[in-house]
Image (spheres, grey):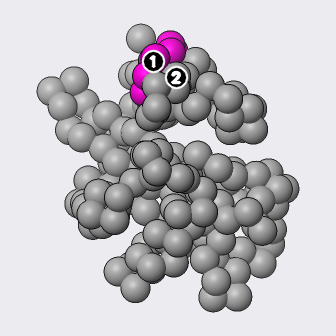
């Protein structure tokens, strides 16, 4: 995940539509190199999923970043997961990533998810600071999560009291 931090008032936040794919994938290509990058087919399936919400940040009609949250209904309730948050380099340090994070949290709450999970590269200090500042707590570490064998920290944020137990 790549993003930054001080809020821009000119930024528009909205849900994804199919015309956004080319610009969205261009940001994916900037933020991640293979083998870390979603391939086009996987990204298309994710943004088209009925069990996901994709938020777009744009300024003056130009996409600045996006975030995707997905969820699954289980016998124990709804489980939500942040698939990615990405901000184009020229828009970083303007609060775009933090606002996208707020939007995906709202989407998770809207489907009654009790908590929200994510993985973050252990070396991504900026993302880790943002998540911790927003109430996410480290729940563990997963070795070899990212190719080529890089570790991820697993973070979780409780969205309502039922998940606190």
Where residue 31 appears, x then y in whole percent?
A: 60, 56
Q: Residue at x 27, y 63 (%)?
A: 41
- In the image, what residue occupies the spot 69% across and 52% down? 3
Q: Residue sitting at 58 percent across and 18 percent down?
A: 138
- Disc 2 is placed on an element classified as strand
Say whether marks 1 and 2 touch (CB < 8 Å).
yes
The residue beneath circle 2 is: 151
Between residue 29 and residue 53, name the one nearer to us: 29
- Give the mark nearer the N terminus: 1 vs 2: 1
Q: Main secondary structure of the magenta part?
A: strand
- Compared with 135, 46 (above or below) is below
Judging by the rendered image, the residue that carries numbered circle 1 is 142
Mark 2 is surrounded, within 10 Å at the Cα level, by few (under 14), some (14 to 19) or many (20 or more) other residues, namely: some
Residue 56 found in image quarter: bottom right
Q: Is residue 112 left or right of residue 148?
A: left
Q: Position of residue 145 (x, y in %)?
A: 43, 27
Q: Is residue 99 above or below residue 8?
A: above
* 94 sits left or right of 82 in the view: right
Instruction: Report the magenta residues as a range.
Output: 139-145
Q: Residue at x 68, y 34 (%)?
A: 124
Q: Mark yes or no: residue 122 visible.
A: yes
Q: Is residue 152 above or below residue 112?
A: above
């Amino acid at each position: 995940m790549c993003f930054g931090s001080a809020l821009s008032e000119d930024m528009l936040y909205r849900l994804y539509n199919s015309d956004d794919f080319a610009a969205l994938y261009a940001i994916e290509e900037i933020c991640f190199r293979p083998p870390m990058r979603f391939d086009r087919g996987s990204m298309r399936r994710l943004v088209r999923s009925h069990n996901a919400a994709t938020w777009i940040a744009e300024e003056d009609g130009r996409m600045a970043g996006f975030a995707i949250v997905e969820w699954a209904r289980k016998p124990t309730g709804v489980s939500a997961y942040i698939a990615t948050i990405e901000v184009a380099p020229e828009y970083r340090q303007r609060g775009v990533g933090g606002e996208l994070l707020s939007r995906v949290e709202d989407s998770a709450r809207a489907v009654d998810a009790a908590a929200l999970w994510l993985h973050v590269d252990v070396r991504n200090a900026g993302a880790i600071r943002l998540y911790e500042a927003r109430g996410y707590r480290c729940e563990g570490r997963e070795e070899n999560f990212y190719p080529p064998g890089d570790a991820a920290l697993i973070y979780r944020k409780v969205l309502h009291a039922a998940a606190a137990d």
